[in-house]
Image (cartoon, grey):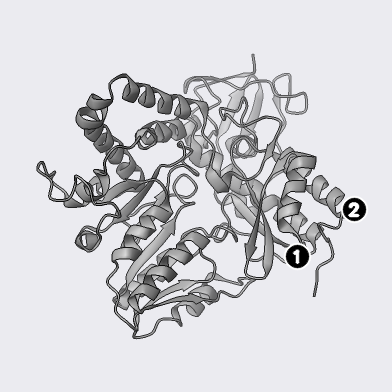
Amino acid sequence: MGPQFKNFDPNTVGISFGIFASLDSVSLPLMSAQTFVGASFLAPPRPEPSLRSVLPPVVKCEMGSAHFRAADFQYFCAMHLPISPSPFLLDPNITYLNFGAFGACPRPIFEDYQQWQRELELEPAQFINVNGPRYLEQSRQALAAYIRCDADDVVYTTNPSYGMNIIARSFPLRPGDEILSTDLEYGACDRTWKYYCEKKGATFIRRPIRLPITSKEVLITDFLAGITPRTKAVFLSHITSSTALILPIREICAAAKQRGLITIIDGAHTPGHLPLDLRDLPADIYAGACHKWMMTPKGSSFLYVKKELQPLFDPLIISWGFDSVEPSHAQFLDYHERQGTRDFSAFLTIPRSIEFMREHQWPDVAAACRRLVRDNAIRFCDLLGSEPICPISEDFLGQMFAIPIQTQDPDQLKRCLFQTHRIEIAINRHGNRNLLRYSINAFNGPDDLDRLFAALQETADKTALLSLVHAH
């Protein structure tokens, strides 16, 4: 049993990871001799001023005759990754640094998923025809409260690309019109817009974003300079995929709205990764994934469309929701939700995902992950002979970091890291660059990045797959 803290309020000092049993008498597990000696608390190295500014006020807490600062304690807990025992189902023999690809499901959420599937198979007709619509409504209400929007303005899709196809297919474009985007977007969405723009005689503009990014202001100015009288909408990512950059969508959307443009956001990486408030964000359309950073089973995502724009968008599949004999109060839901026989159990796990994140104080977990990402960014850039593609700050970096690398065979390098070192990591192409992207979640710790560092050094030393000399 670890030391006891009486009348200690974790909510006040921001205790992370739900490691305490109760609020009025909490117990901290004994972690190591370096952490605790008898009843003495050994504080970690003090954070730099930029981190101190976000810590809670200093509070003295008693532990026998010992005293320590609540800020010290919060900082210690926030930096203690990975959480243990891990609730994730991932293979413990793999160093998994690719959460940004498809997410991963914790056991409690996966068990909830299986319960829904068992109920479906026990009585399929009742589940799909009778109870399913009510279950979906309850799930949408929970999601809407989490992302702060009206539940009637959001529908479930299997992935954000599906949602973006709904938008691009029906978006009203005439020959000569333009959709303005960046050259940082996800490849599937790039292809979607290019395809439908070409069919309608419009142009999909992939405006180059200069890397490295030097500031938000420069990025915003460069992007907005691409707006012309022919521009009808802007489309960009909240967090980019291959480059792992948080883009200043609030400022860009606000400026675009002032110019009378529709704003469309690919938010695949945002829910569960960054706070999302769609009532406050000036985005007309937002596609997000729940199976990434919200950790739900695969194939659970959403599409949000402002109410006044919903009549523009036809469903990709015309089914029972069109000309329905039993229409609901919202045609948007009928069109996009009632699409014949399918297993929508993954959608129904979203309330359990939200509950899981609340139980484990996920904002604190995510903050610790972001900190670990930033703390290791420069050493990987130095190892690989690369300049960071953005400032190392929370303005641009979340729980992922992408580093330009020198390799002639990125696919083989990725296989080598997996087969030889048991490291799962993303290596993405972006134009003429190759980027290695590590993603951090609660099951990762500093040791995982140390293993990656050593594996990259060994691969460069023993193979021709990776060069540590930057090509000028």
Residue at 86% across, 48% down: 458
Q: Which residue is mark 2?
A: 461
Q: Position of residue 23 (x, y in %)?
A: 47, 23
- Mark 1: secondary structure: loop
Q: Position of residue 87 (x, y in %)?
A: 56, 27
Q: Dividing the picture into quarters, in which one does residue 393 lie?
A: bottom right
Kind of residue sitting beneath label 2: Asp
Mark 2 vs 1: CB contact within 8 A: no
Looking at the image, which is closer to me, 320 or 148? 320
Kind of residue sitting beneath label 1: Ser
Q: Which mark is residue 96?
A: none
Residue 55 in sight from this viewpoint: no
- State left or right for residue 128 relative to residue 347: left
Residue at 22% across, 25% down: 126
Residue at 47% across, 28% down: 110
The number of callouts visible is 2
Q: Earlier in the sequence, mark 2 or mark 1?
A: 1
Q: Which residue is mark 1?
A: 386
Residue at 19% across, 44% down: 320
